[in-house]
Image (cartoon, coloured by chain):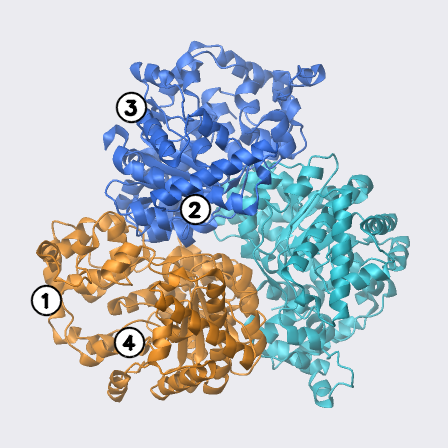
Chain colours: A cyan, B blue, C orange
Amino acid sequence: VTDLHPDRLLPADPATRHVARALYHEIADLPLVAVHGHVEASMLAADQPFGDPAGLLVTNDHYVLRVLHSVGVPLEQLGRVAASEGPAPEESERTAEPRAVWRLLCRHWGAFRATSTRLWLEHELTTLFGVELPLTEAAADDTYDVIAACLARDDFRPQALYRRFGLEVLSTTDPPGADFAPHDALQAGGLAVVPTLRPDTLTDPTRADWAESVDGAGVTSYRGLVDHLRAERQRSAEHGAVATDHGHVRADTEDLGPVDAGRLFDRVLAAHAGAAHVGAAHAGASGAEHYDAERLGAQLLTANAIMALDDGLVMQLHTGVRRDHDRGAAARYGSDVGADFPIAASFTDSLRALLGRCGNEPGFRLVVFTVDETVYSREIAPLASYWPGLYVGAPWWFLDAPDAMARHFAATAESAGYAKLTGFVDDTRAFCSIPARHDVARRVIAAHLARLVVEHRLTEEDAAAVAADYAYHQPRSVYRIGGS
Amino acid sequence: VTDLHPDRLLPADPATRHVARALYHEIADLPLVAVHGHVEASMLAADQPFGDPAGLLVTNDHYVLRVLHSVGVPLEQLGRVAASEGPAPEESERTAEPRAVWRLLCRHWGAFRATSTRLWLEHELTTLFGVELPLTEAAADDTYDVIAACLARDDFRPQALYRRFGLEVLSTTDPPGADFAPHDALQAGGLAVVPTLRPDTLTDPTRADWAESVDGAGVTSYRGLVDHLRAERQRSAEHGAVATDHGHVRADTEDLGPVDAGRLFDRVLAAHAGAAHVGAAHAGASGAEHYDAERLGAQLLTANAIMALDDGLVMQLHTGVRRDHDRGAAARYGSDVGADFPIAASFTDSLRALLGRCGNEPGFRLVVFTVDETVYSREIAPLASYWPGLYVGAPWWFLDAPDAMARHFAATAESAGYAKLTGFVDDTRAFCSIPARHDVARRVIAAHLARLVVEHRLTEEDAAAVAADYAYHQPRSVYRIGGS
Amino acid sequence: VTDLHPDRLLPADPATRHVARALYHEIADLPLVAVHGHVEASMLAADQPFGDPAGLLVTNDHYVLRVLHSVGVPLEQLGRVAASEGPAPEESERTAEPRAVWRLLCRHWGAFRATSTRLWLEHELTTLFGVELPLTEAAADDTYDVIAACLARDDFRPQALYRRFGLEVLSTTDPPGADFAPHDALQAGGLAVVPTLRPDTLTDPTRADWAESVDGAGVTSYRGLVDHLRAERQRSAEHGAVATDHGHVRADTEDLGPVDAGRLFDRVLAAHAGAAHVGAAHAGASGAEHYDAERLGAQLLTANAIMALDDGLVMQLHTGVRRDHDRGAAARYGSDVGADFPIAASFTDSLRALLGRCGNEPGFRLVVFTVDETVYSREIAPLASYWPGLYVGAPWWFLDAPDAMARHFAATAESAGYAKLTGFVDDTRAFCSIPARHDVARRVIAAHLARLVVEHRLTEEDAAAVAADYAYHQPRSVYRIGGS
């Protein structure tokens, strides 16, 4: 088939499906607000044709890579090139020929059954490329050719797709010191691609590269670091940023006075220097040193919140992920090959200092994302049901899948209310998956709300309003798109 | 509309709804057994007309307050008066005029969509006051007038409503030393309003006010404290109490010998005295002191359990809540403004000492409540499926909402069986919300059981028996109402 | 009734039920692959008639015992004999007369409503014994007689039932040094009963009996212990084993060098000796000693994983259970009376060392089981969606119930995909419950997949393939039954 079923993801019960269908159709074609993500502005600005199908849909999408790896396909067969010093071995290069990579995806298509990744790929393959489903190994070369032919066309270049996708805004994620010229150029051309400062290299002293980053920024004191961050925030805002993003392992926050914060900074910097001196990785930090580093990171989150009171950037916090779980793969292929995994999260105690300082301040907005769904009903929704400055982020990463999203709605809306959800926020490096991700989310919220309508917990009018808010208006308004 | 849909909260599938409707109708009109709550006996005994609609339904219901606060309405605009020493500022008084408060509720009615709080309010507004839904800002003055007119009538006084609600028993929550004259008067008048001793000020030494409470009770030793608690328990029982209530942050219990317990008490008392001496809040206690305080609290839980073997009071344990999360609001308005939030809970290791001592003793009953639903299937239901003395409390607080209740049933009944659930226990200060809360619970249990019937996991006869148990018989029997 | 409803456990919605029914019927009669369990090979080899109905279905099934105990029936009335030194008291013997035990089950049949245990018992009672349901106290003697008459027949002997159940393979669980003669005899007779080495007494130094076990094995060094374990693994494989089983409290793993591991072993052994010397239980170990013991256990898990690279045995890890929660009952009746309960589990950080060492190695397979369902979506499924060597074990113990199983599928399949589930693995000592357990699992997977079909997330063909994999092919293939 080359058509997806129009009722996919809608609930089985006929009366509920009837309502869900109506709700979905009202929001299906709303523009896409993509306020968080990892697409590169430089790629969009260059507007070159995408490479081959395997590179676009397999090698550079760590969701796809991960599943193929999990059933035993080595990463080098999937086109990942080892970051070793010498030249890559010939054999490995040959097996990573794009058609061979594509054949591996087709051969293992069954491993993706019922995964969210398959839902997205099916949407891309049919809607964008007109490929016949299911993928089969026998037809692998044919489907490869179909996609390759599309990618060669001008209307498949990044900017053309941006317009075809109905994107109204697209946020990128950018380290301190990033060049915003691509953003400026895109905005000048009418594409609202805006930067998002992610200052983790400067604000998370548990990272091995923190001291180097701080040094590279010419920073030698806590006060100097905060000033540098303020300037970077300001610079991103001048290029259109509406938010910052913070990826700490834990959500811990502190609210120290300037003297204590200054001393803490000095201690942490000295510990990093000592670790470098003895040639040890920072992983070898003592317990006390690690505790100091965590506290300084916690303090810097609050420092960012305080700066947000001035510059109005929405603060996003992504927590609970252990990075580079497969140390061997990280060393060989670099980060972002899919070996990051969730750990237990908590927010109630962790956010107390930051919320106590900023949570009631007019205009302050903190959006929290988690990969531990146990905190939805226990911590995030209750906290957001009180603190005006706290918003419930959309289901993230491993939880951005239909059943997990349904659980998210059921676990948060009853106590926080829909007004305290950000609405749908996707989070991807896979540019072509953005419409699929929004479509899945729109179907799932329609299914969820339809159940409430049929159970007489919400009127159809209220449900329609909530659906449109979730799909479009709420992300615009929470992230102040258009300065709202 | 002024009528709620008769099938609200019942499942969409027609066959399941048919069964659910029948189950619900069999239990809809059973009397209300409200064995836990925070309504004041003195208010019922005084039997004065309720004040204005805003005071009754907004200002004094922290569920409502919380949601309005979360969308940016300051507490002082909602009628909360700062507990400052001087007179409240005039401006704040003016904005908190009851009609203005009511208008704020109406303006932000959309923020309550699909929350449990809205379900309860809708039930109260229509069933009790005949108000037209939805609330709108345009009609705010009209709806205010309708409710105000009701509240002026004699049949809307507390005791008349108690009877109209079909309350069979209502438990209050009372600190050590409480005056039980209002309970006596109400009982003499035929209303079964009974006290519940909540001795946290004496049993939780992590509280800042513990030493003062102990001193106020004339207690100077562990033995003296236990004797004092025994007397207070006995006194409550003589005035009709069937249970005690304990609100500790963690469920930790200890079973120390008298010598160790005595020394621990002495150490904790000395630490409190030391903290008072240097003018420090107890929050500044050292790690070792805090550990001691927690252990003494853990020991005092077991001490209460042992006393329950004699006096037969059911022991209720509410855990996992971090109080006064918004320190600024707590300082300004006092506790109970809605800024209490859940943290992760655990029971298996924590309850081992107490259950080892009392869990197999005839007649001993411990009911546990949690705001962390992860422990339902992991700890509470398994423990209750073995220990005769342990019962699964009803979904509490943030979890007392339809989807959360459905999850509660699905997570506990399969391993613990319905016989080990307490049945529905509401927990509110909002007197007029009691019937709504029971009605929601009765609909949700009917919906849950109907699913099991249609899936052929339970006969209709068994389901009807379980439904009636959950709604009425089980709370009576577990809490020994009428001495059962 | 003596017939169970043919549609039991299938979803209510007619269209979904239609699909579920078809899926179920395709897999209902597939052979049973029981790759994990606690049935004794010696019992099967002896092939003697089972004793009385109470002994078979009540006294020796800790699931049943637990529920009866939880509603107040003392264990001695259920036939458990105290492991005291003197003769058991006469009174207790008389009350534990089998008919009396059976009457207690019948009297408290209502306590089992909607539990998984009742589903299994109902299946056994009707399918195997033709008993009329529901059990009632009035008919207790009749039902007892019906079952007793069956048990006296030759076609109710263990081996006849093994064949009637359609068992294709049955794994036992065996301690180091176990006698595998019963396995050999059964295999010679055509019954594929295979051992599974569970070396916890040697690999978990937090156990009080560890030093004694190590000494009994003649082991005096880390190297000696690993050699002994390798030999035991090899011996089990020679008698047909396909897997090992490891039951540690936590999933922690270490990957120490031989020198560090050797020193750690020496320290732990010395600490055990010291504890024995002062007559203290190991429970009295110091914090540092307990930490050492946990680390050595963590190291021994990785040592087993490394050995699995050579001998090809699948590694099963069961974690998160606190044993002998009721110390009094454990002392009186021994372990396994039902007083084991779950605690919070975690895997991401814990398994990092082991997976880093073995997780990418060809042929390595680690299957993890948990009684904490919060880790399904947070840790286990994400980890299994990357590491080729990690598989998601089936819902275990308290979670082996219809609603919990449905949650398991919904929480794991979206990210890990069905290819990374082991398929259904039962875990029981109750031989006669094995077909019931598989039947429930087959119904629940059919119900789950039918929903995905009707929601157009999976084709019927794909769903049928997944159903058959889950019920039969996947356990065979993951555990390499028949050498696959």
- Residue C394 or residue C249, whichever sits in front: C249
Which residue is at 67% across, 29% downward? B73
Q: CA distance from mark 2 to mark 4?
A: 48 Å
Q: Do dots 1 and 4 share one subunit?
A: yes
The label shown at residue B252 is 2
Q: Work out whether residue B403 can be spotted.
A: no
How many marks are shown on the rendered structure?
A: 4
Disc 1 versus disc 4: nearer the observer = 1
> What amino acid is labelled 2 in the image?
Asp
Q: Do dots 2 and 3 share one subunit?
A: yes
Residue corresponding to mark 1: C149
Residue corresponding to mark 3: B238
> What amino acid is labelled 1 in the image?
Ala
**Where is C104 relative to A54, above or below?**
above
Q: CA distance from mark 1 to mark 4?
A: 23 Å
Which residue is at 43% across, 73% downward? C270
Residue corresponding to mark 4: C166
What is the secondary structure assignment of the residue under circle 4?
A: loop
The chain containing the residue under callout 3 comes to: B
Decide if residue B384 is on the left or right side of residue A409.
left
The chain containing the residue under callout 1 comes to: C
**Where is C374 relative to C262, above or below?**
above
